[in-house]
Amino acid sequence: MSPVINSLSMLSLKCAYRTFDLSSGLGHVSIRDQIVRARLLIRDLKQSGLTANRILIVGAGIAGVCAAVEACREGIEVVCVDTNSRPFELQHKTSHRYVGPYMYEWPANICRPQDFPPKDWPHDQIPWAAFESVMGWESAEPMKSSDLAGRLTTWLEWWLGERATGMRGGPPRLLMKVDPTRVRDWVKKFVSGRSPLPLNLHGIEWPRTDKRRVKDFFPDFVILAAGMGAERTDLGNNVEGLPFWQDDQLRAPATANENVGVFGAGDGALQDFLRALTRYDHPLQFIDELNADPTIHAAFASQHEYLMLVEHQNKMMAAWTRDGNYVADMDRRCRRVADALSKQYAVRRAVARGLRSGSGSVSLYCRESHFTKAYLLNRFLVYLICRSLQNGSDEFADCMTFSVNFEHTVTHASHSGGKYLIAIEHGNDTAHYVFDKIAVRHGVNQDTTAVKQMLGLKNAALATRTTLSQLPLPLFCDRT
């Protein structure tokens, strides 16, 4: 009998001749997902029996660096290129976003703490110390994105100097500030030519600042890890919100007395709605505060098993269903649980305490009839807040006002005198609103993804990856 090999990562991530994509059209994209996915790909590629002595990695973010490190540990020569001046640039940009490897595994108990991999896993099976030479960290709570980027940068500098130099393939070469056009042209030639092709790229070799040229390096494979693509943050007429990974003023004290408009139905919009409205830096803080009340803890515990089933069903349906109809069903189930819990006075009172006091407002506008792709934690909290208000408004008298509006479409937007003037259509009616701040989260422009920019692939060519790319990933990946 022929040996069975691990091949699922190669099947789900292959996008062209000897080319894999770690960045486009993926269903699970947390920092933990990126690390696990990269490690699985290198593991499977090494075990496949295919010639993989040299790899070019495009992108020095979380996924790209992890793939480079893992490939180096497997004795593969690696060149990793990026247009930025340093690795993890996206995460370095903001201290206002909080990240954690397991925060969004809620309601599973592993959502706390935020060590990666989890330190409380049975030590006789997975000793945490064994992960020192890979991308791991210790943290009791979700941390600021910039703090994690700083930790990973420090670790990478240490690893390149102390661990990688003695490995068979040598340390990976990280070439920053490369010309994106030259990279794109090379990748297209590599894919279309289907034959060995030498690199010829100039850049700054990190962590040093020397200008370098990479030539006579013939990659056997290419891994694209150049990010998800450009965000759609505009409302038209040159009115734009800030990118997701950029500091904003939604948590500023003054915002509590201002009018904030959030546009979108996915997870980014829900995150910004919660950041502007609640007293907490991240949603897990809110859940923990609610659970501190024994009465509320008992109420949540009564719904725990059901919410776990809803989350499990959602993940499985995402992998096995191409259309998004299952999301509407999951959305209804989540809303039903929130409604049942919010009928208890103790829950409503605690939810109201978690909101910011002030004369301002936060309004969420969704073009769709329900929330789309979003983590259950954010979806549940938004519905719990909304249903708590509807089931008893007295508790919210001193809070910022808020609303969630479905099937609302922006028809006109302008920015004048520091104010955003937005016309929003609902049914046959159009209303005009004035906002002090806006956040626009309409997803990614699919024409800007790595596979389209570098390979020119059409939507039809990517269709076969649609459900494979939605497969849930392990909580961590050891080196078996």
Image (cartoon, rainbow, N blue to C red):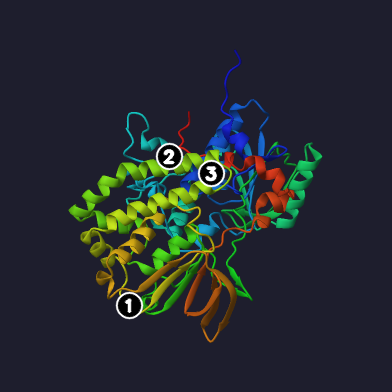
x and y percentages locating residue 273 in the rendered image: 42, 65
> At label 1, which amino acid type do we have?
Gly
Which corner quadrant of the image does residue 233 belong to? Answer: bottom right
Image x and y of residue 400, in percent? 34, 74
Residue at 38% x, 54% y: name it: 335
Residue 334: percent from the left, percent from the top?
38, 51
Numbered disc 3: secondary structure: helix
Q: In which quadrant of the rendered view does residue 203 lie?
A: bottom right
Identify the residue under disc 3.
66
The residue lying furthest to the top in this view is 1
Q: Residue at x 36, y 74 (%)?
A: 401
- Pointer 1 local density, CA inside 10 Å: few below 14, some 14–19, many at least 20: some
Residue 51 versus residue 440: which sits nearer the camera?
440
420 relative to 183, above or below: below
* Residue 161 at least partly seen: no
**Of 435 and 84, the residue lying toward us:** 435
Mark nearest the camera among 2 and 3 is 2
Return the x and y of residue 66 as percentages of the image width and height.
53, 44
413 w.r.t. 473: above or below: below
Which part of the image, by quadrant, shows the N terminus?
Answer: top right
Q: Nearer the viewer, residue 296 or 339?
A: 339
Q: CA distance from mark 3 to mark 1?
A: 44 Å
How far, Cα to Cα, is label 2 from label 3? 16 Å
Look at mark 2 in the image and give the residue it sits on. 475
For label 1, the residue is 358
Which of the two labelled residues, at mark 2 and mark 3, occupies the earlier sequence position?
3
| Residue that sits furthest to the bottom in the current view | 417
**Between marks 1 and 2 in the image, the one whose residue lies nearer the viewer:** 1
